[in-house]
Amino acid sequence: MSAADSSLVSALKDLKLGSILSILSDVLSIISVLPILLSLPRMFMRAETPREMLRQMMPGIVPTVLLFAAALAVGIISLYFWFRASNEFKRHDERLGIGKIGAILSIIGTGIIIVSLLILFAFLPQMISMIGSAIEMPPGVTDETIGRQFAMRFLSLIPIVVVMLIGALIYLVGWILYGVMVMRLGEVQGLNPDFKYAGILMIAGTLLSLIGNLAIIGLVLELVSLIMILVYSDMSIKSLTSS
């Protein structure tokens, strides 16, 4: 096996591992919402007040947060391997360097999202308490202090939400650029030509995830593209190592 093929195999192994971790991250993200969904019937059937509703939700919130945190951690690790793979691919062909740019943007976007979420979570207990207090007031009774505090707190969170959305946009742009690199892998001699279809699905899934009603379809397409990348990486590794 030549030095060039050895470099490709190394990149493909990182790409394969990155896709496995990304699939695991997506699965954990999907599973993370199940505890909340399972608690909804109990919450609406047994809860008579907003505070009681929150109390019914608490058993589901903890595993949801833990699973989401695990998904986020696995996702970050997967981005590291995506970056390593793109760096190796760039050494083989400069045209594949677009994937490295995409990986860097995705990492930056993820970092912005994480910081924004941590700030939002820090304010969440106060917001829930204020909402609960406002809802439980007798009809016709208003509390200007609570209303003013809630409005000020809500307005103070808008910049954080905007920053988080910017981070998400940066991440998505990076993911699209990485999809372009995956498409171009199909043109590299010795690699599975069907990589281009995986790249197309990767880009399509990312774009559809931006459209409300089609977001689920986008998620499915992205998951399919990750599975395809995993399979084609493995096939390409076997092809290169056997030659």
Image (cartoon, rainbow, N blue to C red):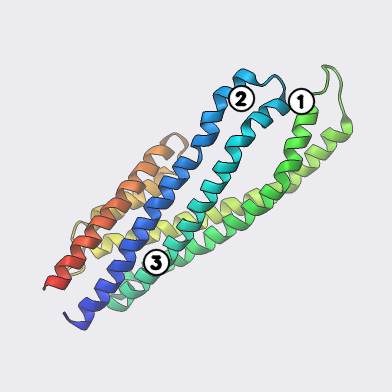
Of the image marks 1 and 3, the number of the one nearer the N terminus: 3
Picture residue at 29% right of the left edge, 73% below the top: 10
| Residue displayed at 33% across by 67% down | 14
Can you tell which quarter of the image residue 237 is in? bottom left
Packing grade of label 2 (10 A; few <14, some 14-19, many >=20) is: many
The earlier-in-sequence mark between 3 and 2 is 2
Determine the CA span between mark 1 and mark 3. 48 Å
Identify whether 137 is placed above or below 93: above
Q: Is residue 56 above or below residue 95?
A: above
Q: Secondary structure at mark 3?
A: helix
Residue 43: assigned label: 2
Taking the spot 88% from the left edge, 35% from the top edge, the residue there is 145
Amino acid type, residue under disc 3 in the picture: Phe
Q: Residues within 10 Å of mark 3 (few under 14, many from 20)?
A: many
Front tag of 3 and 2: 2
Where does label 1 land, which residue? 135
Residue that badge 3 annotates: 81
